[in-house]
Structures are given as C-alpha cells and as structure tokens.
Image (cartoon, grey):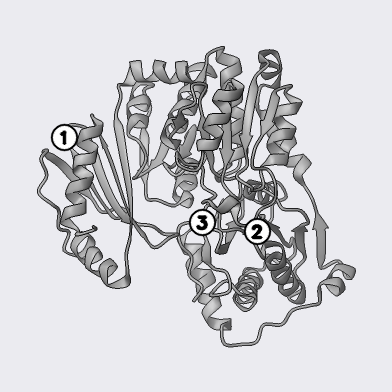
Amino acid sequence: MIKFGTGGWRAVIGDEFTKENIQILAKALADKMHAEQVTDKGIVLGYDRRFLSKEAMQWAGEVFAKEGITAYLINKSAPTPLVMFYVMKHALPYGMMITASHNPAIYNGIKVFTAGGRDADETQTADIEKYIREVADIPVESMEYDEALGKGLIQEIYPLNEYLDEIIAAVDMGKIRKAGLKVALDPMYGVSETSLKIILLTARCDVETIHERHDTLFGGKLPAPNAVTLRALQNYVLDKNCDIGIATDGDADRIGVIDDKGRFLHPNDILVLLYYYLVKYKGWSGPVVRNICTTHTLDRLAEKFGESCYEVPVGFKHISAKMYGTGAVIGGESSGGLTVRGHIRGKDGIYAAALLVEMIAATGKKLSEIFDDIEAECGKIYMEERDYKFNQEKKNRIKKMLLEDRMLPAMPYEIEKVSYLDGSKVYFENGGWVAARFSGTEPLLRIFCEMPSGEEAEKICSIYEEFLELK
C-alpha cells in the first residue's frame, strides 16, 4: 500500500498512515542502506506539526536503531528544508521528513532525501518500494526509544542555527537593515515562524505574525499558500501598511506572497521576480528550470537574458536534477516551490522569503513596481488553473482518452505541438498552452492554461471541461 508520488508517500492518518506502515518503510530504507553499505554515517529524521508526526519520526528511528543505524532525530518540529540541508551539509546518504506538506490535515506522509540533500527520484523510490514488498509480510523489529537513546543509536539534535547561518550568510543583511522594512508573516500554523523571525529580526525588519500557534487542523483550512487561504494575510498587509506579506505551507518548503498593494502573487510571479532580480540586479548568469505547468514568462525572460529555459515533468526531483545538470540560476514550479543555485537542491520557502526581502531592500522598489518593470519588458500573459475530483472509473476513462488514445478537443487556435512528457500538454502557435495531468499527491485532475488574455485561458479550460465531461 506504500506508494511514492511526486512529493513522497502520503496517506490518510489511521487508514494507510499507520505505525505498521511507517516502520515497514523505515525497515525497507534500512535494508537499502545495508545493501549499499552506507550505514556508517547514519540517517537524519525530522517532523512537522501534523498529528502523529513526532511519534512517526520516533517509530521510524526505533527501527533504524534496531538495524544498527544511528538515527539523528531533530527533536523539535522543523522545516523540511532543514532536513535536506543537514543531509547535504553532513554528507549523509539519506534523510527522512515526516510531513504531508500542503495536503489536508487528515493526511500525513514521509519524504525521503538522498545524498546531497535531493528529493529521492523515481529510481530511488522504485528501489525503496521493491524493499517494501520484500518486508511487507515480515514482522518489523524495533528497539525501545529510551534504550536506543542510551546506546547512542538514537541521537536527538536541533541543527536550526547552522541552517539559518547559511541563509543569513547568503543574503545581503546589510542592505535589508538599512531599508527598515515591515513584514507580515503567516506560517499557516506550520513550522516556519521561528526560522523566518530569526532571519528578519536579525536584519532589523519590523515583523508581525498571524496564525503562528500549533494547530494540527491548520485552522480548518488547507495549509497551502494560495489566493483563497491567504485572504487574512492580504487584509493584514493592507491594514498594517506592510512592504510584503510572506506565507509558507505546513512544512515550509513552499511560499506564498502578498505584495505591497495587497495583491496575491502567484508562485509563477515569485519565480519570475527572483530570476529577474538574480540576473539583472545581482549579476548572475545561467538558465532557468520550470515544470510543464509553470509560466512561460520564464521562457521570455530567459530569452531576453540570452539564456535557456528548460521544461521538466512535475515533481521537484526533476527540477533539482535539471538544475544540477545545467547550472541553472533558479528552478521552480507553479505550486510554490523553488530553489536557487548554491543552496540546497530542493524547495526552500524560508530562503526564498529572505531573497524576496533582500530584493525589495536592494532595488529600493516595491514588489508591485518590480513586477510592473518585468511586464513592461516581457508582456503580460494570463493563467487559469482548475482542479477536478474523480472516482476510479472516471480516472480510467480520462486517462484512456488523454494519454492512451491521445484524444484532444477541437481547439479554436492553431496547434504548434503536443507533448506527453507528463500528462498532455498542447502548445499553441500564439504562445499559449494548456496542460492536463493527474496530481501525484492528491486524487485530482489538474488543468493549467496560459494565454494572451484571461478570457482565452478560461475558454480553453471550459472546452476541456466539456470534452472530458468533468462537470
């Protein structure tokens, strides 16, 4: 029952996310480490604020201890990027994070990271699943927590300072200090508050925080920083006259932003802003990487800089792998995750937030002004996104139509090409595109469309809706 999607293994708590399955996964990874002869350096484990996250980390640690593998357990709820950073910094072969990221509160899950602090790719996760099948019907043995702690096979650590020091050294704290910025934070009841506050207060920002308490139900909302969930932050930014509002998802690897005018900046806009800033203002050079559902404004910007934009399937492991192979400046996805060259090879909402604050300070411009500059140079394009739930019968029918029979609806625009790199993506000759794919983390079909006007984008999505009988 344990299957890895685009963002690790996720399951409903008490259904598939159980102590038994957590320990089966830990045993499988331990067997993989034994086979690869990489047990000597141990493994690091972290957890977020979800229900059963801390207990799940401890249950997994007890299995590694029984296998003679030292488990370094981060003993306070922590951001996912901290675990990735620790794997990279201490040259560990693997790391595990107990989180379901931005999924609803009834979910929990596990992300696995490999050498260098990267998301486990399909080859790695398929290998873990092979080991899972081998141990699924065998009782998994574990060592009592206190016994493992006494023997040093479980070691409790809290390496937040070295992670934050790395970020503080990477951003221009001097310029931020001089700017006197006012920042509103919304951790969305997740794990980012301590990290972001330390960085911003060190830079002498005036910091105001909402939704900081521990709530395993995330205030009854999805812990994903989107236009719907960040309305309270929008109002706060306007009421308090803040320079920027920053939100992170439940495990702080994704970011959402409200600009100085109270407007929600789509993750596409954040990627565009940071690529523009890093190349034009900081003098970096190099390509950019995006997934198939992310804005083509990045392509236009890269072309203006004399660089390339690389397209990859959905799943951050594809972003990080392509960045590593091309030396890209930045890579990201329309769901809010991004990474920057020279930092960890995975999503980090905390580092992205620090860079955005630096950008406002260093340019002396408001976020809205910088984005206006970009649109003046690259033009404006509009994105429409729609999600649809389905049962298995409907999923099979849609999958057959789109991916097996490769059927397409009649389109009102000339088609340049069609790609099946990940789902189905149609590129139009007018520069627009539409992509339809099944989510790898939730039971959803997602349709993304980007066109020269909002009306055209809505029209294409509605054509797909009717064609696939989604409503």
Q: Name the side, left or right, on which 282 lies relative to 397.
A: right
Residue toward you, 115 or 370: 370
Residue toward you, 361 or 312: 361
Q: Residue at x 58, y 60 (%)?
A: 112
How packed mark 1 is, by other alpha carbons closer than 10 Å (few <14, some 14-19, many 20 or more), is: few
* Secondary structure category for the residue under label 1: loop
* Secondary structure category for the residue under label 2: loop
Quick one: quadrant of the C terminus?
Answer: bottom left
Query: Which amino acid type is marked by label 1?
Result: Glu
Where is 396 relative to 310, above or below?
below
Residue toward you, 129 or 123: 129
Does residue 329 appear anywhere in the picture? yes
Q: Name the side, left or right, on which 203 lies relative to 133.
A: right
The residue carrying mark 3 is: 103
The residue carrying mark 1 is: 429
Q: Picture coordinates of residue 262 (x, y %)? A: 49, 26
Task: Report how far apart the C-alphas of labels 2 and 3 lie in the structure.
Answer: 27 Å
Q: Name the side, left or right, on which 292 lies relative to 425.
A: right
The residue carrying mark 2 is: 93
- Tally of numbered tags: 3
> Which-is-in-front pick, marks 2 and 1?
1
Query: Which amino acid type is marked by label 3?
Result: Asn
How packed mark 2 is, by other alpha carbons closer than 10 Å (few <14, some 14-19, many 20 or more), is: many
How packed mark 3 is, by other alpha carbons closer than 10 Å (few <14, some 14-19, many 20 or more), is: many
Q: Earlier in the sequence, mark 2 or mark 1?
A: 2
Q: Earlier in the sequence, mark 2 or mark 3?
A: 2
Does residue 284 appear anywhere in the picture? no
Query: Which amino acid type is marked by label 2?
Result: Pro
- Point out which mark residue 128 bears: none
Q: Earlier in the sequence, mark 3 or mark 1?
A: 3
